[in-house]
Amino acid sequence: MNTTDPSEQNLIFPQGEKANPDYFTGNAWVKLLVNENEFNSVIGNVTFEAGARNNWHTHPGGQILIVTDGIGYYQEKDKPIQSIQRGDVIKIPADIKHWHGASRDSSLTHIAITAVTPKGSIDWLERVTDKEFNSYSVS
Amino acid sequence: MNTTDPSEQNLIFPQGEKANPDYFTGNAWVKLLVNENEFNSVIGNVTFEAGARNNWHTHPGGQILIVTDGIGYYQEKDKPIQSIQRGDVIKIPADIKHWHGASRDSSLTHIAITAVTPKGSIDWLERVTDKEFNSYSVS
């Protein structure tokens, strides 16, 4: 079963807490799995409803996304939106401005592994506008 | 659907390559997701058939296991075997001698996130004997 219907998702983790609306547009949830005092990375499971995404942001030490369910979007500044789906592993270099989230029609669940550095792990920037989010086109 | 029958598993990643038999007893497979040149950790997906396990080993920088399917065992030296299952997150401290694998009757799939340090990421030790493996008892 490899469905993208959120109601059919075979969730591995509890949904967790509602993501901070200052940094997310639409409904998203974060389940913290490993905190920065426990390992050299912060690890969390993030679920986005269809249409939901995080703000533009950067990571001083980079980040790895492991998509465990659904279909979503990933975009780096000045590049087109990429479609991402279950089984994809996204390697986000340090200091690259980007955002990620669900696609227009499907939810997305990913594990996020974020390096902890002396400069922290994340710097939040402006929201992803509806115009930006809706710019995805199948290439 | 939260099954432990391997034939019913809803696999996220390809199975990958057969694990090195010098360090594994029974059948296991490793799919490398992120290598040590790409991030501050090595990340892989590991699948163990029922009865399969890795050797005793240590990690200079610790390791995180995220169990995505099945039921397995985790044991630290001088402690009893713990049962682990889908959704469990195991935080393995640096330099603690341990092993992990499937249980007697079920396969196990986990993502392994291993810190990369100047001392490397893993030191392999002796095999887990059948007597050790079969010492699990429900507490």
Image: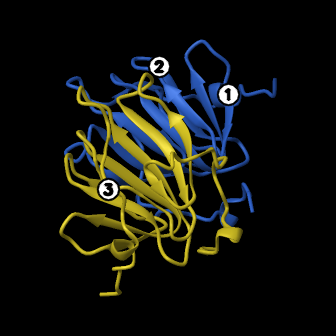
Chain colours: A blue, B yellow
Q: Is residue B60 left or right of residue A86?
A: left
In this rendering, do the residues under marks 2 and 1 share a single chain? yes
Residue furthest toward the right? Answer: A139
The numbered mark at residue A97 is 2
Q: Residues within 10 Å of mark 2 (few under 14, many from 20)?
A: some
Mark 2 — on which chain does it sit?
A
Mark 3 — on which chain does it sit?
B
Kind of residue at badge 3: Trp
Comparing labels 2 and 3, the label whose residue is closer to the camera: 3
- Where disc 3 sits, the SS reads loop
Q: CA distance from mark 1 to mark 3?
A: 41 Å
Q: Residue at x 31, y 73 (%)?
A: B81
Q: Position of residue B96 (x, y in %)?
A: 20, 53
Q: Position of residue A84 (x, y in %)?
A: 66, 37
In this rendering, do the residues under marks 2 and 3 share a single chain? no
Name the residue carrying label 1.
A82
Name the residue carrying label 3.
B56
